[in-house]
Amino acid sequence: MGGQGLQARARQKTVKRIHISDDDLARAASDGDGAAFSTLLARHYDRLFGLAFRMTGSRADAEDLTQDVCAALPSKIRSFRAESRFTTWMYRIMVNAAYDLRRRRAAHDKAAEGWGDWELARRDEAKETAEQVDWLIATMRALPDDLRDTLALILDDATHSQAAEVLGISEGTVSWRIYEAKRHLAALRAKEDRA
C-alpha cells in the first residue's frame, strides 16, 4: 500500500506542475528543483528545436543547438530573475546560441577562404610535376647509357664534381654529357609536341 501511496502523490505533484506557470517553475528550478526544470524542458523542448531549425535551416544544426542550450540551461537558469517571461528569456538563450554558431562559421569560412583555391593550385602543380617526372623517366630510357647515368646522378643532387668522381671522368665531361642529355631531351619534346 505504501508504494501505491507514493505513486499517487507523485501523480498529484505532476498534475499540479502542469498547472504551474513557466515563471513559477523557472523560479523553482533556479532554486535547484530538478522536477521543475524537467517540466520546463518537457514543455519547451519542441519549441526550442523549432526555433533552432528555423534559424539554421538544418535539422542537424538545430539538434546540436537545442542539445547545447538544454545542457547549458541548468547553470543559466540560476540567473533567471523573472524580469521577462521565461519563454522570452529561454528564446534569447537560443537566439544567442544561433548567433554564436553563425559567428563561428563565418570566422571559419573567412579563415578557410582561399585555401580551396590554394589546394587546387597545389594539386595542379603536383600533378604537373609528377607528369614531368614521369615524362623525364620515360624519355631518359631513350638516351645513350653514358648520358642517362650522368643525368641520373645530377638529378639526384650530385654536383658535377661528385658525378665525375663516381663515373671516373672529368668534370668537363660531366658538363658536356649534361648538355648533350638536355639537347636530346629537348629534341624528343619538340618531336612529341609536333605529333
Image (cartoon, grey):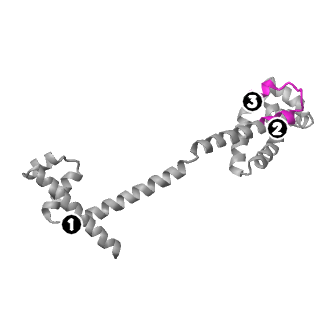
> What's under tag 1, amino acid-wise?
Arg
Q: Quadrant of the C terminus?
A: bottom left
Q: Nearer the viewer, mark 2 or mark 1?
A: 1
Kindly check if marks 3 and 1 are in contact, taking CB atoms under 8 A apart as contact. no
> What's under tag 2, amino acid-wise?
Tyr
Disc ID at residue 74: 3
Is disc 1 surrounded by few (<14), some (14 to 19) or many (20+) residues within 10 Å? few
- Residue 172: horizontal and vertical position, in percent? 12, 52
Q: Which residue is mark 2?
A: 91
Residue drawn where x is 19% and y is 47% of the image: 158
Secondary structure character of the magenta stretch overall: helix
Is disc 3 surrounded by few (<14), some (14 to 19) or many (20+) residues within 10 Å? some
Name the secondary structure under disc 2: helix
Lower sequence index among marks 2 and 1? 2
Name the secondary structure under disc 1: loop
Instruction: Let me know if residue 37 is in the magenta part.
Output: no
Q: Which residue is mark 1?
A: 141
Can you see residue 1? Answer: no
> What's under tag 3, amino acid-wise?
Pro
Residue drawn where x is 49% and y is 51% of the image: 119
Instruction: Let me know if residue 92 is in the magenta part.
Output: yes
Kindly check if marks 2 and 1 are in contact, taking CB atoms under 8 A apart as contact. no
Q: Nearer the viewer, mark 3 or mark 1?
A: 1
Question: Which of these two is toward me, 83 or 118?
Answer: 118
Residue drawn where x is 20% and y is 56% of the image: 152
Q: Quadrant of the N terminus?
A: top right
Can you see residue 67? Answer: yes
* Magenta range: 74-93
